[in-house]
Image (cartoon, rainbow, N blue to C red):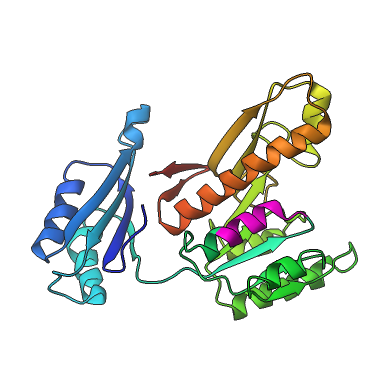
Amino acid sequence: MTTSPAALRLLVQCPDRPGIVAAVSRFLFEHGANIVQADQYSTAFEGNGAGRFFLRVEFETAGLDLPADTLAARFAAEVGTPFAMEWRLSGDHRPRVAMMASRTDHCLLELLWRWRRDELAVDIPLVISNHEALRADVEAFGIPYHALPVTNATKAQQEAAIRTLLRDAEVDLVVLARYMQVLSADFVAEYPARIINIHHSFLPAFAGADPYGRAFERGVKIIGATAHYATHELDEGPIIEQDVVRVTHRDARDDLVRLGREVERSVLARAVQWHIEDRVFVHGNKTVVFR
């Protein structure tokens, strides 16, 4: 479900305690908001004491008695601070998303197709690659393409150039659509929980390079894909979405690659969609995802 132009989203996480939902809903009601969707979760249900509370509320703004910025200030004073909330209002800004890919096109083209069909409500100011291979495909969508080759000797300079491009484009989210380079810790730290990577295995199995080859050698019966937020630790970031497909002894390595690519495309697309709709909350090295 996407948000209508006349709606906003309130995203909250805080220590769990009684009265949070009542306070939020009362505040919104008193200021003329009409709640159209609400999701909540508490880690207290996991048996970890009082727990952490997560809340996503989508509400119509036509009847508001205050401008959004004034509403936010009032919410901070009357609800946010008393409940020690980390919170934000969202939905009044179309996300700007940069795509990064190497030579493999299936994940990138899936996202571009969805964007062209208005299924992905974002602006894509640029695509960045370390190869020229995808230029014609990307430019056919009318999107600027930047090829920045890299070697071990030039990696630092290449990454600095990428970060400049992203800053100049005022990017909100970076999607690694099979970008086969490891990002530095400084790069990742600049976009905390705002870099989504697709890994072509069902993590934590077969992290790192050539997961299909290692899966084939191991004779697995299930292969999968994992979309996760990138962190300074390779393939260890909070997982957003995963899926699998069954394989058999009759499948060659190339069959695993072909079947896996279908899963990769859908898993990454769902993760990006949920992120831009503010359905993903990061909690430590885990996520809460309100689908």
Q: Is residue 108 magenta?
A: yes
Q: Magenta segment, which residues?
A: 104-113
Work out which quarter of the rendered image holds the C terminus and state it: top left
- Estimate the x, y position of residue 33 in percent, counting from the top left: 16, 63
Query: Residue at left 47%, top 43%?
Result: 287
| Quadrant in the picture for residue 101 | bottom right
Q: Nearer the viewer, residue 140 or 33?
A: 140
Residue in front for this viewpoint, 192 or 266: 266
Q: Quadrant of residue 145?
A: bottom right
- The relative height of residue 83 versus residue 163 in the rendered view (above or below) is above
Most extreme residue toward the top is 249
**Of helix, strand and loop, which mostly describes the magenta segment?**
helix
Is residue 176 visible in the rendered image? The answer is no
Measured along the vertical axis of the image, is residue 24 above or below residue 32? above
What residue lies at 70% left-to-right and 35% top-to-bottom?
259
Q: Is residue 278 left or right of residue 6?
A: right
Residue 242 x, y percent position in the rendering: 56, 38
Whether residue 225 appears in magenta in the rendering, the answer is no
Above or below, comparing residue 70 to residue 59 in the picture? below
Residue 80: x percent and y percent?
Answer: 25, 59
Give left or right: position of 71 versus 211.
left
Q: Is residue 228 left or right of residue 4?
A: right
